Amino acid sequence: MFSKPSLAVIMDPIQNIHPKKDTTLALLLKAKSRGWDLHYLEMSDLFLKYGAAWGVSRSLSVFEDLYHWFELGEKTEQPLNQFDVILMRKDPPVDMEYMYATYILEQVESNGTLVLNPPATLRDLNEKFYATWFPQCMPPTLVSSSKAKIREFIEEQETAVLKPLAGMGGRGIFKCHAKDPNLNVMVETITQDGTRYVMAQQFLEEIFLGDKRILLIEGEPLPYALARVPKEGDFRGNLAAGGQGRGVFLSDRDRWICDQIGPSLREKKLLLVGIDVIGDYLTEINITSPTCVRELEAAFNMDITGEILDCIEARLED
């Protein structure tokens, strides 16, 4: 039994987060309340030395204060296996630097440190592509770098959304109409003139009722979702793009989708996952740094962070 686990978090610069809604901060605050020993790293602090994974970490204190939410200690260089658990919460893009970091984390994982979500899954399960493993849950979807195939798909659907495979937060997304005079420009831009794979999906009008973020812990969904409604004049529900969230109960269809993907999440030992559902359709499976915990806790008086830490403690005891 770990009476006081040491936890290292790898994240984007903590001084730049939005403390009111940041899920990583919420997890750290809960860990602090349980007496966990907290340490902070950014991805550039990781390195491999003589076959061992190391990091330049700083002790971390966190506070429920919108103007003073953290304090960092002095830098310490140490092997990463000194930590009981490492949370990899770096936001996308999942680029080559991110991939290299997963190799370092996989090395320390092989030596007994609990890394969440597991490095191999972070590397192998692209958040857009992973959803295509469940075509029965998805709207009509194409992944291609071919400008001709993408234009053909848009003509078939009449209206479609084009997404970069490595993005997040609604950035770089185009809503395309088959008769839009700028269609060729949009396709050329997002594919970088046919050299980059992108995802094209049928545009779902239900987006204006909300893009539902459903959180699953150990493959099991919470009973509520956060419906993120686009702001006026936009089609993106992402909170980072200005969408407004409201708590909703899961529908029967939502639960069916979760039943379809839950076994895969458990098999891959994914602790926290956030799926996106528009209308009746799964559109993405987010595993890198799922959000919306704070909004759901506030809306339904839930202790989601406590449930997540309970699962971490159970894994540490195994």
Image (spheres, rainbow, N blue to C red):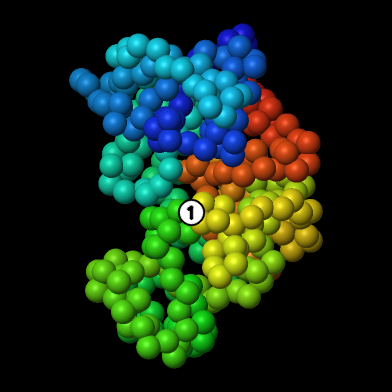
Position of 36 with respect to 245 (left or right) is left
Q: In the depicted view, which residue is nearer to us: 58 or 245?
A: 245
Instruction: Determine the residue located farthest toward the front in the rendered image.
Output: 67
How far across and how far down the image is residue 281, in percent? 63, 67
**What element does badge 1 sit on?**
loop
Q: In this view, does 72 lie above or below 109?
A: above
Q: In this view, does 82 lie above or below 261?
A: above
The residue tagged 1 is 169
Residue 236 occupies which quadrant of the picture?
Answer: bottom right
Residue at the spot x=37%, y=88% of the render? 181
Q: In the depicted view, which residue is nearer to us: 221 or 246?
A: 246
Disc 1 crowd rating (10 Å Cα; few below 14, some 14-19, many 20+) is some
**Quarter containing the N terminus:** top right
Please state the total of marks drawn on the protein image.
1
Kind of residue at disc 1: Gly
Position of 126 with respect to 23 (left or right) is left
**Quarter containing the C terminus:** top right
Residue at the spot x=71%, y=53% of the render? 246
Residue at the spot x=48%, y=59% of the render? 170
Residue 80 occupies which quadrant of the picture?
Answer: top left
Q: Kindly tell me whether residue 268 is visible in this rendering.
A: no
Instruction: Determine the residue located farthest toward the bottom in the rendered image.
Output: 179
Q: Kindly tell me whether residue 222 is visible in this rendering.
A: yes
How far across and how far down the image is residue 39, in percent? 45, 18
Residue at the spot x=30%, y=27% of the render? 46
How far across and how far down the image is residue 232, in percent? 60, 67
How far across and how far down the image is residue 222, in percent? 72, 44
Instruction: Determine the residue located farthest toward the left in the rendered image.
Output: 50
